[in-house]
Each structure stands twice: as structure tokens, then as C-alpha cells.
Image (cartoon, rainbow, N blue to C red):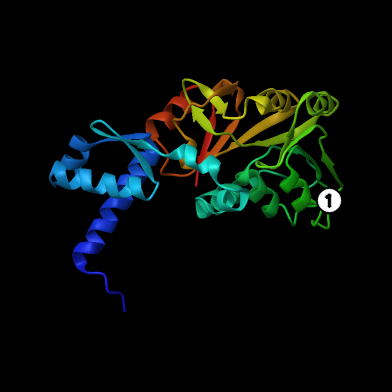
């Protein structure tokens, strides 16, 4: 039996909601949280201090901002575990858009890897990827037609290949669909990434396919990162979670993006 008291449960639930708001908006304010929960600003500051100690946010004057960048200090397996269920739902929806016989370019990242796992029963696919982990996963699928791993400079921390060789090689191919992930998706700033060396390769991937499917969990929505890949209107379909920032989602729909919420 749990030793948690009722007050402790209320505290944990409140802090969970604070983190959810922070992930959706990127920033929270003490005064607004105080009104939301009907408690003192002193109590809210205590919550934020504790959450900062846990590495879940960064305190600023009057509130807090997301500690999202800490995600990129995780190893690959830890990133796979982060928001796992949300990513799995997205992957199932993305896999349903792939049909037997498709040629599919799959980008790097943990959500594309989850998509690859969901393609295990598809037949006669040609998969082109710059992701070491996606290529490795695809090699275990019995019904693949072919798996092409792009050559170039290997980033072992993030398990992808990039560089001029990879860009030159992708220009030789034409594909039906692209499964692409990114570090930020904004209706205003477009699709962005921390990895500027991969941005040009991602742009070339988009140019080589009939349909670009962007897969990103709700924490990526509304963010803008270091290097721009493309404007949001270059994306045909975005698959994200149903708790993603609603204003951003509406902004993307207005720019012609099909949005699927899971």
C-alpha cells in the first residue's frame, strides 16, 4: 500500500499539470499558475523550485521555461523512452499511411524508428534512410524489398548520417513518401532542427517525395530551433498528439497542412 498522503497526491498531480502546460506552451508564469490552481504564489514557486531540481524546467524571473534542451543530452535509449506512448501512437498512425510496395524515405530520430517498427508486416517496401537505427531495424523485417542506408559522416550520438555524400546520394532517388521528424514545428517559423548539418539533407528528402509526413510528439509543437528545414506549407501531413498546442495546430491547418491528432 502506498504511503502517500492525500495532500501528497494533490501536489504530485498539480506538478504534473504544470509540466504538461510547460511542454505545451514552452513557458509558465507564477501569477497565472497561482490563479489556475487557486493557491498562493509562494506555493507555486516551491513547486517550480522542486521541478527545477528534478531537471524538468529552468526557473526564470516570474516563472519558468522548458528544460527541453536536456532531452538532447540523453543517450539514444533514454530518448526512445521519453514520451514513449505518445510516440508509439504517432507511429501507428504514420504506418497506416504506408502501403505495400511503397518506396519510403525515413529520416532520423526516435519517432521515425518507432514508425519503422510498426512497418514490420508491410510487404515489398523500399526504405531509404540516413538513420543507423532505422536501417538496423529494417534489416530484421522479413518482407522488405530493399534497405538503402545513405553514406556520409556518421553522428554516433544521434545515430544518423549527414554531409555532402548523403546529400548527393539522396538526389539519385525518388520516393512515394517521407517520414520526417524534427526538433520544432511552428506555424510561423516552420520545421526546424538543432542539427544544422542535417537540415539540408532533410530539405533534399522533402524535394524527392510525393508526400511528406511529419511525425512529432506534442512537445515539439510551437517550438522553433536553431536551423530551419522548410516552411510549414511544405509539409503535407503532420501527425502529433491530441494535447498539442491548439493555436499552433489551427495555424498549420490554415496554411494547408493536414493534421492528424492521436
Residue 232 percent across, percent down from the top left: 55, 23
Task: State the count of labels.
Answer: 1
Name the foreground residue: 16 vs 237.
16
Vertical placement of residue 1 versus 254, above or below:
below
Please tell me how crowded label 1 is: few (under 14), some (14-19), or many (20+) other residues with Cα within 10 Å: many
Name the foreground residue: 106 vs 236.
106
Residue 43 percent across, percent down from the top left: 17, 48
| Residue 73 position by quadrant | top right
Q: From where the camera sits, is residue 96 visible?
A: no
Q: Residue furthest bottom?
A: 1
Residue 30 percent across, percent down from the top left: 21, 37
Residue 167 percent across, percent down from the top left: 78, 25
Name the foreground residue: 30 vs 38.
30
In the picture, measured across the screen, residue 2 lies left or right of residue 233, that is left
What residue did someone put label 1 on? 144
At mark 1, the secondary structure is loop
Q: Residue at x 26, y 52 (%)?
A: 14
Vertical placement of residue 3 versus 17, above or below:
below
Q: From where the camera sits, is residue 87 visible?
A: yes
In the picture, measured across the screen, residue 154 lies left or right of residue 29, that is right
In the picture, measured across the screen, residue 57 lies left or right of residue 195, that is left
| Residue 140 position by quadrant | bottom right
Locate the N terminus and report the quarter of the image it occupies: bottom left
Q: Residue at x 44, y 44 (%)?
A: 242
Q: Residue furthest front?
A: 53
Amino acid at each position: 500500500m502506498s504511503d502517500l498522503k492525500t495532500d501528497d497526491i494533490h501536489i504530485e498531480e498539480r506538478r504534473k499539470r504544470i509540466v504538461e502546460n510547460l511542454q505545451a506552451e514552452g513557458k509558465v508564469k507564477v501569477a497565472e499558475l497561482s490563479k489556475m490552481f487557486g493557491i498562493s504564489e509562494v506555493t507555486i514557486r516551491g513547486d517550480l523550485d522542486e521541478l527545477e531540481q528534478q531537471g524538468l524546467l529552468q526557473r526564470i524571473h516570474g516563472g519558468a521555461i522548458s528544460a527541453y534542451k536536456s532531452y538532447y543530452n540523453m543517450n539514444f535509449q533514454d530518448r526512445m523512452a521519453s514520451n514513449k506512448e505518445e510516440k508509439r501512437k504517432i507511429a501507428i498512425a504514420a504506418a497506416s499511411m504506408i502501403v505495400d510496395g511503397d518506396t519510403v524515405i525515413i529520416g532520423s530520430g526516435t519517432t521515425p524508428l518507432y514508425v519503422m517498427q510498426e512497418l514490420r508486416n508491410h510487404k515489398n517496401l523500399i526504405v531509404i534512410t540516413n538513420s543507423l537505427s532505422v536501417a538496423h531495424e529494417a534489416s530484421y523485417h522479413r518482407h522488405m524489398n530493399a534497405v538503402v542506408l545513405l553514406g556520409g559522416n556518421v553522428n554516433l550520438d544521434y545515430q544518423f548520417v549527414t554531409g555532402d555524400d548523403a546529400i548527393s546520394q539522396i538526389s539519385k532517388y525518388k520516393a512515394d513518401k517521407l517520414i520526417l521528424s524534427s526538433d520544432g514545428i511552428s506555424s510561423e517559423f516552420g520545421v526546424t532542427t538543432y542539427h544544422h548539418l542535417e537540415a539540408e539533407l532533410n530539405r533534399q528528402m522533402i524535394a524527392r517525395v510525393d508526400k511528406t509526413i511529419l511525425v512529432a510528439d506534442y512537445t515539439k509543437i510551437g517550438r522553433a530551433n536553431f536551423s530551419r528545414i522548410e516552411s510549414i506549407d511544405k509539409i503535407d501531413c503532420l501527425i502529433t498528439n491530441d494535447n498539442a498546442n491548439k493555436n499552433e495546430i489551427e495555424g498549420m491547418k490554415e496554411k494547408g497542412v493536414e493534421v492528424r491528432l492521436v
